């Protein structure tokens, strides 16, 4: 351990600790624009200058790169230190006078304007008839954070410092876009002045599926209302996993592991199978939103500003990337928006069923648009289905707000203009069945109200729990009216949209019902089993295992020691499938053996 004093306050730190970090232990703030806890010290900005007293008037040094030593006396704020920092700030302001961070620091040190002349700008390029081409605004203070994080953490080496002294600048190799850049956005996220930015090669200001040009943080919350409300590491956005898979196994980044004070993150952990004994199971695996990409006529993924309802919902969130504002890809607000209902539902080519929620969330979108902007809203619908409490009143309210309803499914979305007013617009083509005419309506943005689809792993899930599936892939209840949350397997209940498309009130009600059923089963302590179950005659069974493959309830197992099939009477429902298929006649149903049936027949005939 090392003992030193900072501004007269004693502090004890570990060997190798820098003066800057020692000051942080005492909650003494030292300004810096080039330091990061997760990068090697660089001392590029010189703002962290402090005085080290040595009995001869002391000397100035950068605290972020100077290791603390035993008996060291440090002064972080006196006339000499402030004079040095003021000189550094004036030099930086001369180079980058518009950087807000430098202006704020300058104000703290009483700097209104730098005394130094700005460095000469490069000569503008371009021909005279094109007019003067202004040089790009210089916001780079050469702190080195971007290059260091690219080298030390991302391990991409896509950018570096070029030239020397006042001619230095940050650039990719040969001043050309580097193929080693993985577009992770680390350089932009750490840049203190906003000089490093992520640009889109299509000149988009926003990408609707992501709501930002910079890569989304790999560690994030699913939603603000998520339960449990904890963040997760998203594999597809993580620099570490990207470099492990595509960078020759590079062990990159791991900043999240170092930053977590509770050591909750382990990027080397693997999925584990955990077995647990439970008294009841509630299956609530939910749904997936329909991917409209196969519907080519709507242009999703091909035309700009054609987005799904989920992407629009995320954009409208007040805590989202756009703070609840609706933007087009060019960063402007739309003047007109079309909302197309039943995309993927009520369609023989995709899903024939109604998704139930599309009409109402489309109406909600229209209300939000009218609330946030003056944009015109067009609703393209087949039939307006609003059967819930106060739903029809909400529909009437939107009519009063000026939302335009067009009765007719949108046939096609195109960007091919036929009239001057359609230039630069998306054109929704449809047949308006109320007026009996074909219409072309130009809009700035199209929202596709996509269907609710069964989860992709629904079939695998239902096999695990031995529950049924309907033709569309949703789980099947035991009885649609008398047992809407029960399944054919005792102790297994279903809840929510995994049973079929439904809105939030219905999902909450069904979830409460499933929880009550599960609790009543557990509280009972004992359960009644079917009196009529299958049995295996051990003397006759040949061990062919045919009954095991045919049992719909996975109630039959194979005894390796006896080499015969064994029935689990708790799982068996007495359907008789095994008894009918057994080639040796070893499988029978209790109370339905041949002798019992013959005796019943004789009794009837007697």
Image (cartoon, grey):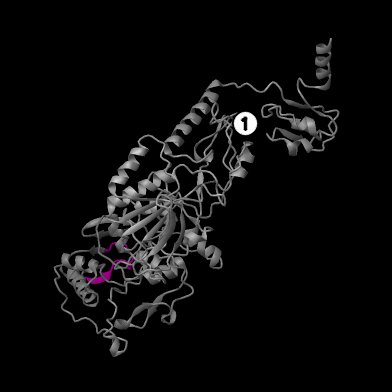
Residue denoted by label 1 = 488
Res 123 quadrant in image = bottom left
Residue lying farthest front? 436
**Residue 561 image point, x, y percent:** 80, 35
Q: Does residue 123 lie above or below 506 as drawn?
A: below
| Residue 559 visible | no
Res 445 quadrant in image = bottom left
**Residue 249 image point, x, y percent:** 55, 65
* Residue drawn 28% across the image and 73% down it: 139
* Residue drawn 24% across the image and 77% down it: 95
Q: Does residue 81 lie above or below 337 as drawn?
A: below
Q: Secondary structure at mark 1?
A: loop
Q: Between residues 531 and 274, which one lies in front from this camera angle?
A: 531
**Residue 450 image point, x, y percent:** 47, 51
Give yes or no for residue 62 being in the magenta stretch: yes
* Residue drawn 85% across the image and 32% down it: 584
Q: Between residues 33 and 352, which one lies in front from this camera angle?
A: 352
Res 472 quadrant in image = top right
| Residue 89 visible | yes
Q: Between residues 345 and 43, which one lies in front from this camera angle?
A: 345
Give yes or no for residue 150 being in the magenta stretch: no
Crowdedness near tag 1: few (<14), some (14–19) or many (≥20) residues, C-alpha within 10 Å: some
On screen, residue 28 versus residue 358, left or right, reads left
Residue lying farthest top? 606
On screen, residue 6 versus residue 455, left or right, reads left
- Name the chief secondary structure element in magenta: loop
Magenta part of the protein: which range?
A: 57-72
**Residue 420 image point, x, y percent:** 35, 70
**Image quadrant containing the C terminus:** top right
């Amino acid at each position: 351990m090392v003992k030193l004093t900072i501004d007269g306050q004693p502090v004890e730190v570990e060997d190798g600790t820098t003066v800057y970090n020692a000051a942080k232990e005492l909650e003494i703030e030292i300004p810096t624009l080039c330091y990061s806890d997760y990068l090697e010290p660089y001392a590029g900005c010189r703002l962290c200058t402090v005085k080290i007293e040595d009995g001869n008037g002391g000397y100035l040094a950068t605290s972020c790169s100077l290791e603390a030593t035993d008996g060291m006396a440090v002064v972080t704020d006196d006339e000499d230190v402030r004079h040095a920092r003021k000189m550094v700030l004036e030099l930086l302001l001369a180079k980058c006078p518009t950087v807000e961070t430098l202006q704020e620091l300058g104000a703290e040190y009483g700097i209104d304007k730098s005394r130094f002349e700005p460095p000469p700008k490069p000569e503008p390029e371009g021909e005279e008839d094109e007019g003067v081409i202004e040089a790009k605004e210089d916001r780079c203070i050469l702190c080195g954070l971007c290059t260091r994080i690219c080298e030390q953490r991302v391990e991409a080496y896509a950018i570096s410092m070029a030239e020397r002294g006042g001619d230095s600048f940050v650039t990719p190799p040969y001043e050309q876009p580097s193929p080693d850049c993985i577009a992770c956005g680390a350089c932009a996220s750490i840049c203190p002045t906003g000089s490093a930015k992520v640009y889109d090669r299509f000149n988009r200001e926003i990408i609707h599926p992501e709501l930002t040009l910079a890569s989304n943080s790999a560690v994030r919350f699913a939603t603000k209302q998520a339960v449990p409300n904890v963040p997760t590491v998203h594999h597809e956005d993580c620099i570490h996993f990207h470099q492990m898979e595509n960078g020759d196994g590079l062990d990159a980044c791991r900043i999240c592991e170092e930053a977590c004070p509770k050591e909750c993150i382990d990027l080397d952990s693997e999925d584990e199978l955990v077995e647990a004994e439970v008294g009841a199971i509630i299956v609530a695996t939910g749904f997936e939103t329909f991917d409209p990409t196969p519907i080519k006529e709507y242009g999703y993924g091909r035309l700009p500003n054609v987005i799904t309802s989920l992407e629009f919902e995320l954009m409208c969130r007040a805590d989202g990337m756009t703070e609840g504002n609706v933007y087009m890809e060019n960063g402007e607000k739309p003047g007109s928006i079309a909302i197309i209902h039943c995309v993927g539902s009520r369609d023989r080519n995709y899903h024939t069923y109604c998704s139930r929620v599309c009409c109402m969330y489309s109406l909600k979108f229209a209300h939000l648009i009218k609330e946030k902007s003056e944009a015109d809203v067009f609703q393209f619908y087949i039939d307006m289905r609003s059967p819930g409490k106060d739903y029809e009143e909400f529909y009437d309210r939107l009519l009063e707000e000026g939302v335009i309803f067009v009765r007719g499914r949108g046939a096609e979305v195109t960007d091919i203009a036929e009239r001057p007013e359609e230039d630069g617009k998306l054109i929704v083509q449809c047949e308006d069945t109320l007026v009996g005419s074909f219409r072309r309506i130009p809009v700035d943005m199209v929202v596709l109200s996509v269907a609710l689809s069964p989860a992709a792993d629904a079939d695998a899930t239902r096999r695990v729990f031995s529950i049924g599936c309907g033709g569309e892939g949703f789980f099947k209840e035991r009885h649609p009216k008398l047992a809407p949350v029960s399944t054919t397997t005792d102790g297994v209940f279903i809840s929510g949209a995994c049973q079929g498309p439904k809105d939030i009130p219905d999902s909450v009600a069904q979830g409460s019902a499933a929880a009550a059923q599960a609790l009543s089963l557990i509280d009972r302590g004992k359960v009644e089993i079917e009196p009529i179950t299958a049995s295996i005659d051990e003397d006759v069974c040949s061990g062919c295992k045919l009954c095991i493959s045919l049992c719909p309830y996975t109630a039959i197992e194979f005894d390796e020691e006896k080499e015969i099939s064994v029935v689990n009477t708790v799982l068996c429902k007495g359907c008789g499938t095994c008894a009918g298929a057994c080639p040796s006649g070893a499988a029978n149903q209790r109370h339905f053996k041949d002798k019992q049936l013959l005796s019943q027949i004789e009794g009837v005939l007697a």
